[in-house]
């Protein structure tokens, strides 16, 4: 079980919180709006009404002890920037921030965000990829150059070990996880694991290399 802090409980933040809880993880949510906190009081593991830009508040919840901190506010640029900067300064070990534009994203990366999410753009990218690639599941951009992608293995991969696939991946893509059809999953799988039909493979690498795998047979 992992633990997460979600700062800002708008539609994106609360949707993320619900999903993480459904997956069996702990979530501490915080929002400055009293009505929002009351509305979702029974849904989250922990929920507090607080000024999320307050250094004292972020220190009091010991953000450094959580696996990740998500800044789920983007409409207010000042709040987004301040919260990201302070959360990083007080010790957040992995920081994900929501953005509203490419310029906003660049600012967030510069002040310490590890991953920046631009929901509307990311959703557009996912839909486009899904329309053109039979084996593509989803893709998350973690920087302008690198992404994480889930795919079904192409027919040409079936029956081969991950080690045997390395040359075809140009050694610029790393296998983060492999999930079998029975839902059992392995993080950083052994290179000797044999790829089977129905597997889902999680890859991380250069965007250009990953895109070449879409629709590969």
Image: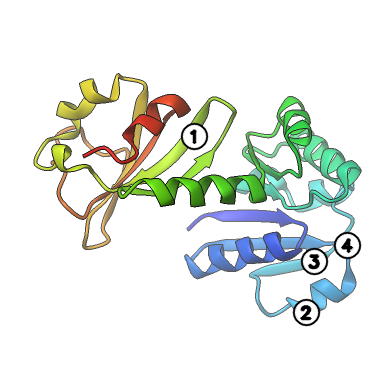
Foreground mark, 1 or 3, reads 1
Return the disc, 2 or 1, that comes first in the chain's sequence.
Answer: 2
Q: How crowded is mark 1: few (under 14 residues within 10 Å), some or many (20 or more)?
A: many
Foreground mark, 2 or 1, reads 1
Q: Where is residue 171 in the image (x, y as percent from the top left)?
A: 31, 19
Foreground mark, 2 or 3, reads 2
Residue at mark 1 to residue at mark 3: CA–CA distance: 33 Å
Position of residue 8 relative to residue 216, above or below, is: below
**Which corner quadrant of the image does residue 7 belong to?**
bottom right
Residue at mark 2 to residue at mark 1: CA–CA distance: 35 Å
Position of residue 73 relative to residue 111, above or below, is: below
Tag 1, which secondary structure? strand
Foreground mark, 4 or 1, reads 1
Q: Position of residue 15 (x, y in %)?
A: 63, 65
Residue at mark 4 to residue at mark 1: CA–CA distance: 32 Å
Tag 2, which secondary structure? helix
Residue at the spot of label 2: 39
Q: Where is residue 45 in the image (x, y as percent from the top left)?
A: 64, 70
Q: Position of residue 53 (x, y in %)?
A: 88, 47
Residue at the spot of label 4: 32
Residue at the spot of label 3: 48
Q: In which quarter of the image is the C terminus?
A: top left
Residue at the spot of label 1: 147
């Amino acid at each position: 079980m992992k633990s997460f802090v979600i700062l800002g409980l708008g539609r994106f933040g609360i949707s993320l919180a619900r999903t993480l809880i459904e997956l069996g993880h702990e979530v501490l949510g915080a929002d400055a709006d009293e009505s929002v906190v009351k509305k979702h009081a029974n849904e989250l593991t922990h929920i507090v009404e607080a000024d999320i830009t307050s250094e004292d508040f972020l220190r009091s919840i010991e953000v450094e002890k959580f696996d990740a901190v998500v800044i789920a506010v983007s409409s207010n640029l000042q709040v987004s920037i301040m919260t990201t900067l302070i959360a990083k300064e007080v010790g957040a070990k992995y920081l994900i921030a929501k953005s509203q534009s490419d310029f906003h994203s660049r600012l967030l990366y510069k002040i310490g965000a590890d991953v920046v999410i631009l929901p509307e753009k990311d959703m557009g990218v996912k839909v486009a990829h899904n329309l053109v690639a039979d084996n593509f599941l989803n893709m998350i951009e973690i920087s302008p150059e690198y992404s994480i992608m889930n795919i079904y293995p192409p027919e040409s991969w079936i029956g081969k070990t991950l080690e045997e696939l390395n040359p075809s991946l140009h050694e610029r893509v790393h296998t983060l996880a492999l999930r079998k059809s029975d839902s059992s999953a392995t993080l950083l799988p052994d290179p000797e694991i044999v790829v089977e039909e129905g597997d889902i493979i999680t890859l991380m690498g250069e965007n250009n290399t990953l895109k070449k795998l879409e629709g590969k047979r």
